[in-house]
Amino acid sequence: MLELALLITCALLGMTGITLINLLTFPRLRPASSPAARRRISVLVPARNEAAVIAETVRSLLAQELPDLEILILDDNSIDGTAAIARAAGAHDSRLRVLAGSPLPAGWSGKPWACHQLAQAANGEWLIFTDADVRWQPGALAALAAEMERTRADLLTVWPTQVTETWAERMIVPLMALAVIGYLPAVLVHHVPWRAFTAATGQCLAFRRVAYDAIGGHTAVAATVLDDMRLARAIKKRGLRLRMADSAGLLVCRMYRDWPTVRDGFAKNILAGYGDRVLFLALATLFHWLVFLGPWIWLALGRRGDLPGWPLWPLALGGLGLGVRAVTAAFTRQRARDAWTLPLAVLLMTWIAIRSVWWHWRYGGPQWKGRVITPAPRHGR
């Protein structure tokens, strides 16, 4: 038991250290003080049944002030009038094109296929893939372009500020910030070539066109649900420059609206995040139980055997976990006061993991927007 307590202590101290490093070094978008170099920029938005959000997204993109900009929306066989709403929001602006998606071919997942079609139609020197529910505040695109120029990134991935309102969103969505800011030093992502030090979000992926083509574009990740991570790893494997940045409120996104969409949205990705290996997901779930629930269980059970330091030791460990959760939320402009929900969130993530495994065994892959997403084959594994 003492060894287990020491393991939890080391894990939490490590997360605390990584969080502190990232607070000092994690880049943030800043309003551009001068126009970016003149480049043709294509903003590419795959949209499937996005009638509730697409109009505001289109208007926010058309409000961006860049000299050479095109915006492409691909209607991915929607049944809710997404394309018509996007066109109406565009008000005949020549910078906007709304494309009709082709039927999903065998061997492709939905989003990679939509992004591939967008890339084929785009004319830009830079390709910026963004989700239909991401809102671009005034000056956001200029700030992203300035960061691309500053870092000379071949791929810049920007983490939007997450908007959360319902209890499920507030408990689960900020765990993404905990995973990025608390687990992965940005300096290693940027400067160490190992693919283990990779992070990316499909909510905003900005490529230099030559880099995108060099890695094979979305054709290289056709059958995966985690196209963002696979593309980022391909950039690193090719020896190209991967960079990350927090949007600092210039991009905002409300991913989900209630518990069912939170549950299924995270279940869609969680198993793929562990290489579609149920054992790895089970081990990660056990780790999070130990680290974030273990101290509170120890505190509730009282002094046990050879474990010294009760109650201060488990209290300190529990406080460290909540502290990391609070600080990573505050850094990404989310509610720090919701940190107390972390132990409950771990339980909910366990249920999400179970749902993902069930989909894997029952259907062969996760379900999303009426499609079953079959995992990509593991070549050479």
Image (cartoon, rainbow, N blue to C red):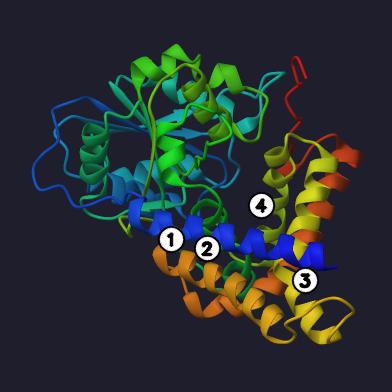
Q: Residues within 10 Å of mark 2 (few under 14, many from 20)?
A: many
Label whose residue precedes the other's in the sequence (3 or 4):
4
Query: Residue 143's image quarter?
Result: top left
**Do the CB atoms of the residues marked 4 and 1 lie less than 8 Å apart?**
no
Name the residue: 32% across, 49% down.
27
Label 2 element class: helix
- Per the rendering, the mark at residue 330 is none
Task: Compare residues 210 and 366 and report the one nearer the observer.
Answer: 210
Q: Which residue is mark 2?
A: 16
Residue type, label 2: Thr
Label whose residue precedes the other's in the sequence (1 or 3):
1
Query: Residue 244's image quarter?
Result: top left
Q: Position of residue 223 (x, y in %)?
A: 68, 24
Label 1 element class: helix
Label whose residue precedes the other's in the sequence (4 or 2):
2
Name the residue: 35% across, 15% down.
210
**Do the CB atoms of the residues marked 2 and 1 lie less than 8 Å apart?**
yes
Q: Position of residue 190 (x, y in %)?
A: 40, 35
* Mark 4–mark 1 distance (CA, rounded to whole Å): 29 Å
Whether residue 123 is situated above or below residue 357 in the rendered picture: above
Asked if one can make out residue 105 in the rendered structure from this viewpoint, the answer is yes
- Per the rendering, the mark at residue 20 is 1
Residue type, label 1: Leu
* Mark 3–mark 4 distance (CA, rounded to whole Å): 27 Å
Q: Residues within 10 Å of mark 3 (few under 14, many from 20)?
A: many
Label 4 element class: helix
* Mark 2–mark 3 distance (CA, rounded to whole Å): 17 Å
- Per the rendering, the mark at residue 294 is 3
Residue type, label 4: Gly
Task: Compare residues 79 and 171 and report the one nearer the observer.
Answer: 171
Query: Residue 40's image quarter?
Result: top left
Q: Which residue is mark 4?
A: 265
